[in-house]
Amino acid sequence: QDSPYLKELIGDILTNHRDLNIKIRTIVHNQIINNWKVNDHPEHFKTISNRLVKQHNSEQILQLYQTLLLDNSADQDFYFQEGITQLLLSGLVSQQQGKIKVSNPIYEAIFNLAWIKDELSKLELESEQSTTENIGQTFINYLPNITEQELYQITDAIFEQYPDKAKIMLSRFLANTN
């Protein structure tokens, strides 16, 4: 059972033994924060991560969380932002003394600004790949029904509007035709 006395006793011991406190911080940092992807059994941190990055509005959720991290907390008006529900349900943030804050320092260390940047980059790459695949598939489906003149107009427009994606699409198209 939960014992307030034992919690207080252990808290006092840790407070009065600076070297022990440093050792505990080091262990937490090395075993949990630095290696959360490897040591996450049962999956707790991955569940939080997935709740944020596997949503239709993941980019918005991550940007909202980024704002929260940068500002250190947010007031009640923050509740009306789309995406706050996912952040609260994930447990990553909570309401504390009328403000929305990151729930604890371990979460803040794991799900930090570098993590947000990395996840936003992954989402952007997935979006670009999806767009490229959609353009390529539309092009391939439409190809048998167009004239040579239309083909030149379409390819010129694609290369003008999406130069990088067009190169990828063309290489995939050529690979499919060989």
Image (spheres, grey):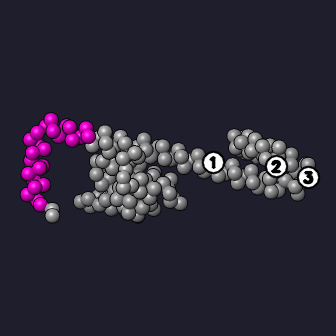
> Measured from the top left, where is residue 132 in percent x and y?
69, 49
Labelled disc at residue 83: none
Instruction: Name the residue tied to disc 3.
Output: 147
Give the amino acid type for the residue marked by disc 1 in the picture. Answer: Glu
In the displayed structure image, the side of residue 8 where residue 66 appears, left or right: right
Looking at the rendering, which quadrant does residue 88 occupy? bottom left
Query: Is residue 99 inside the magenta stretch?
Result: no
* Mark 2 / mark 3, whichever is N-terminal: 3
* Mark 1 / mark 2, whichever is N-terminal: 1
In the displayed structure image, the side of residue 63 where residue 122 appears, left or right: right
**Chain part drawn in magenta:** 3-27
Instruction: Name the residue tied to disc 2.
Output: 154
Question: Of residues 170 and 9, which is closer to you in this image?
Answer: 9
Looking at the rendering, which quadrant does residue 27 occupy? top left
Query: Is residue 11 inside the magenta stretch?
Result: yes
In the displayed structure image, the side of residue 86 where residue 176 appears, left or right: right
Say whether residue 131 is visible: yes
